Image (cartoon, helix red, strand yellow):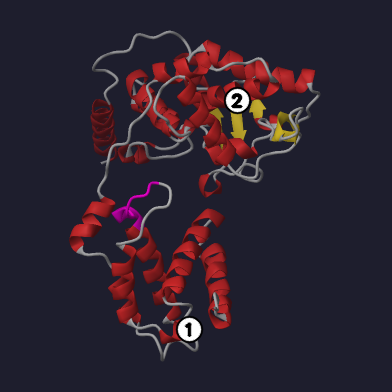
Amino acid sequence: MRKHHPGNERIKRQYFVFLKEAKRQDESSVDAVAMAISRFEAYTKWRDFKSFHFEQAVSFKMYLAKQVNQQTGKVLSKATMNSTLRYLKTFVQWLALQPGFKSRINYTDAEYFNLSGKDARVATARRDRPVPTLEQVRQVISLMPSESVLQQRNRALIAFTLLTGARDSAIASLKLKHINMQAGSVFQDAREVKTKASKTFVTYFFPVGDEIAQIVREWVTYLRVGLLFGNDDPLFPKTQVGLGASGVFEASGILREQWSNATPIRKIFCEAFALADLPYFNPHSFRKTLVQLGESLCQSPEEFKAWSQNLGHEGVLTTFYSYGEVQENRQAEIFKTLQKPRSISQNGGNVEELARALAREMRVHSKCET
């Protein structure tokens, strides 16, 4: 039975190039689109895209609503359905403008991929996700063993994630040259580090405790002095797998190679939280933990803006966009100050109050200009 259509494959390749080069989407985003299109093709038994009709979109929605997530065993979430249909809608709209498809596909037929208003609201509703507390993360790290080199790496990995708030894809691609223990910073260089939206920025260590920084410091020293790793070697090396004494393949050490993706990192997190008898929190959740810490510690709009920049984005609070960039030297000074013990005010660290303070400063500035 045919499981592809030559004409479809050719036009899909053109579309993926369009997404990557014209729309500047990263590989993971393009892969998600490709998966959605493949799912639709399988449903239509790989019919030619030129034969697309709005009834296919309608029946595919009904089919998708009955599908089961293989990991959870439950029907697909509205969010998954919404993203899949949105990818297909955009694809069909693009198709309708291409030579050879214009006369065959009605541009407005792509609208039939829309969910109902009710389902769309459910799919896009904002939901608060559980966030680990700083105490929980510290507990996880404290319970992690550190006898073997793999155990040391895993413990340092989680400590580093808390210390920097770096995304797991960035962590997997970091090299030793990107971390400066003396300055307490990490240079996330988009030329070599897989940062979101290929953004280059400097992250200074968050004030999460000297013991956390010490774990990372000891790991870096061990790599450089103990294993003679150089600047271009990975900060968190790939696991070496070999034939063990029992005759089966097992982890036996580390390689001078980087992980190709962040999947092993998430597995390490899962095992660490299980060891501490705590629910699993993924690496990205640590960024939310750090945002909450910032809301408590930062006592001025400038400090919170520096905290936001340290996470690599400009909009933890959209209101702070107009405040302008905090210069890197000033960012470093602020973080040196934040490293010092400071009483956490019950009210002074409230984000809403910081936003109101900024608004007042902007009004004053506006009056001065007029």
Please name whichever residue, 323 or 163, is drawn nearer the observer in this view of the structure.
Answer: 163
Amino acid type shown at disc 2: Asn
Q: Where is mark 1, residue-wise? A: 48
Which residue bears the numbered disc 2?
154
In this picture, residue 252 sits left or right of residue 103: right
- Counting from the top left corner in percent of width and height, residue 290 is at 41, 26
Report the Cα–Cα distance between label 2 and label 1: 49 Å
Pick whichever, 286 or 66, lies toward us: 66
Choose top left, top right, bottom left or bottom right for residue 216. top right
**As displayed, is residue 234 above or below residue 132?**
below
- What secondary structure prevails in the magenta region? loop
The span shown in magenta is: 72-80
Q: Is residue 150 above or below residue 27?
A: above
Mark 1: few/some/many CA within 10 Å (<14, 14-19, 20+): some
Quarter of the figure with the C terminus: top left
> Quick check: can you spot residue 358?
yes
Q: Residue, x 58% and y 26% (percent of image)?
A: 157
Magenta stretch encompasses residue 73: yes
In the image, residue 176 lies at what x, y percent?
A: 70, 30
